[in-house]
DNA sequence: GCCAACGTTGGC
DNA sequence: GCCAACGTTGGC
């Protein structure tokens, strides 16, 4: 089981929206590196949901319940024959007891090489197991 | 509101 | 296939 980190602009779609909907298809990702991460997801994997903008914090946990599959709105395959615009279905698992802020992550040197810190524009990334444990502890997830 | 760090586009 | 110009994201 791998844990990922998914960014979202809470004004567009927040973790609370996912809780309300119970389930959603995570569409709209177009960055190639982010899409590669989505293609590597498997049913049962989990994802921290991170709010960009004013919040800049991990606020909850979701689980991959289906996919990755081709976005029906944007069909097509890449050079490897995989869906170009890959999508997964998520369900809300749990809200973080205490949000883990970007400031806290940046302030801990264990996270210095983490993609969230190194590449601020990347919207989907795998979280290394050692770091995942730290985040879960901090967040109460 | 600015700008750094990317991605993308289009002319050649 | 390169790369200059432009667009976008997201932190500050």
Image (spheres, coloured by chain):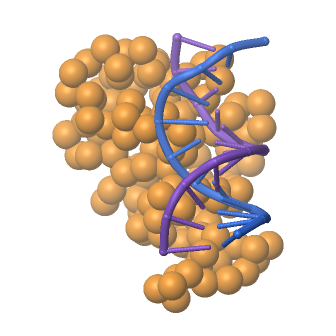
Chain colours: A orange, B blue, C purple
Residue at (77% x, 38% y) in the render: A12
Nearer to me, A53 or A46: A53
Residue C3, percent across and down? 54, 54
Apparent side of residue A140 relative to residue C6 in the rendered image (left or right):
left
Apparent side of residue A22 relative to residue A60 in the rendered image (left or right):
right
User: Which quarter of the image is occupied by the C terminus of chain A?
Assistant: top left
Residue at (27% x, 29% y) in the render: A111
Nearer to me, B3 or A7: B3
User: Which quarter of the image is occupied by the N terminus of chain A?
Assistant: bottom left
Residue at (43% x, 38% y) in the render: A119
Q: Is residue A61 visible?
A: no
Residue A67, percent across and down? 55, 72
Q: Is residue A24 visible?
A: yes
Residue A80, percent across and down? 47, 85
Residue at (20% x, 27% y) in the render: A110
Apparent side of residue A123 relative to residue A105 in the rendered image (left or right):
right
Name which quarter of the figure residue A70 lies in: bottom right
A110 shown above or below A108: below
Residue A68, percent across and down? 54, 72
Nearer to me, A120 or A104: A120
A42 shown above or below A126: below
Name which quarter of the figure residue A132 lies in: top left
Apparent side of residue A57 relative to residue A54 in the rendered image (left or right):
left
């Amino acid at each position: 089981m791998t844990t990922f980190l998914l960014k979202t602009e809470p004004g567009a779609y927040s973790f609370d929206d996912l809780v309300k909907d119970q389930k959603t298809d995570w569409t709209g990702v177009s960055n190639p590196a982010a899409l590669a991460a989505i293609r590597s997801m498997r049913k049962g994997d989990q994802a921290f949901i991170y709010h960009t903008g004013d919040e800049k914090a991990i606020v909850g946990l979701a689980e991959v319940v289906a996919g990755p599959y081709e976005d029906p709105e944007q069909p097509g395959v890449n050079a490897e024959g995989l869906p170009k615009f890959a999508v997964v279905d998520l369900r809300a698992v749990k809200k973080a007891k205490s949000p883990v802020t970007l400031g806290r992550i940046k302030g801990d040197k264990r996270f210095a090489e983490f993609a969230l810190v190194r590449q601020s524009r990347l919207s989907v990334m795998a979280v290394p197991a050692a770091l995942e444990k730290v985040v879960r502890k901090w967040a109460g997830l």
